[in-house]
Image (cartoon, rainbow, N blue to C red):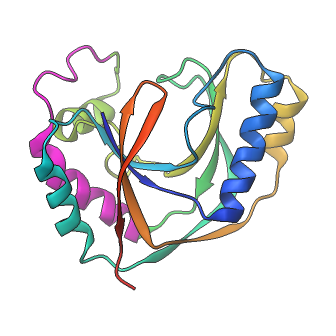
Amino acid sequence: MIGIFIEPNKELKTYINKWKKKINKKFIKTKLISHPPHSTIYYANLIKDKDILKVLETTLKTINSFKIIVNKTLIFYDDKLTGGDTMCLSISKNNKLSQIQKKIAENLKFFIKKNSNKNTKLNNKVLLTSLTKYGYPFVGDHWLPHFTIGSIKNKRNSSEFHQFMEEKVKFANNVDYISAWKINGNKHVLIKRFKLKN
């Protein structure tokens, strides 16, 4: 699997890691906690091909660096992908980010491995359409960009869960590069960072 990510700046990364540690220490069954702090733009089962990096480089070298704002906590209750409640930091709606996602997904859809999505359990038409076309169910207006903390099960009444929901957050994050990662289960290996135009 290949993931295309935005990485947080130092201040935001510190905040995300603080919460990852807090949740990991408190709860035994957590998912996504070990993943490096990031916001997923695109994630798909792509053919291992050097051309992917060339296409990404060509796609991203025309894009100017930009700013995102993280301004609230977000919970994906009963997350279909994890089976738990996924704690996130929401990125404010950003047309530039949506355009970048669409451009990346359009340019990489030709590298999707055949039959890689046949075992999907999705029963949502919008998600299935996106998955079929792009190899990733969250391409389009229904995408909610975010930085994930972790996913926990049956802990909605915990003080940590409530504290997280009530946190007031405000981070401005310059996006100067976008990175490509090879992902195998919980293991994430950086392939390359693509610098955006200044």
Image position of 25 with respect to 5: above or below: above
Where residue 41 sits in the image (x, y, percent)?
39, 51
Looking at the image, which residue sits at the far bottom?
198
- Picture quadrant of residue 70: bottom right
Q: Main secondary structure of the magenta part?
A: helix
Image position of 154 with respect to 164: above or below: above
Q: Nearer the viewer, residue 85 or 16?
A: 16
- Picture quadrant of residue 27: top right
Where residue 60 sits in the image (x, y, percent)?
27, 68
- Let me know if residue 101 is in the magenta part: yes
Image position of 118 with respect to 124: above or below: above
At 55% across and 50% down in the image, what residue appears?
Answer: 146
Q: How many marks?
A: 0
Image quarter of the N terminus: top left
The answer to whether residue 167 is left or right of residue 116 is right
The answer to whether residue 141 is left or right of residue 25 is left
Where residue 22 sits in the image (x, y, percent)?
81, 35
- Let me know if residue 57 is in the magenta part: no
Region of the chain picked out in magenta, as a range: 96-120
Image position of 81 with respect to 193: above or below: above
Q: Nearer the viewer, residue 193 or 170?
A: 193
The answer to whether residue 174 is left or right of residue 197 is right
At 31% across and 65% down in the image, what residue appears?
Answer: 99
The answer to whether residue 48 is left or right of residue 186 is left
Image quarter of the C terminus: bottom left
At 29% across and 18% down in the image, what residue appears?
Answer: 120
At 13% across and 21% down in the image, what residue appears?
Answer: 115
Q: Nearer the viewer, residue 4 or 164?
A: 4
Looking at the image, which residue sits at the far right?
159
Where residue 134 sits in the image (x, y, percent)?
21, 41
Q: Nearer the viewer, residue 185 or 101?
A: 185
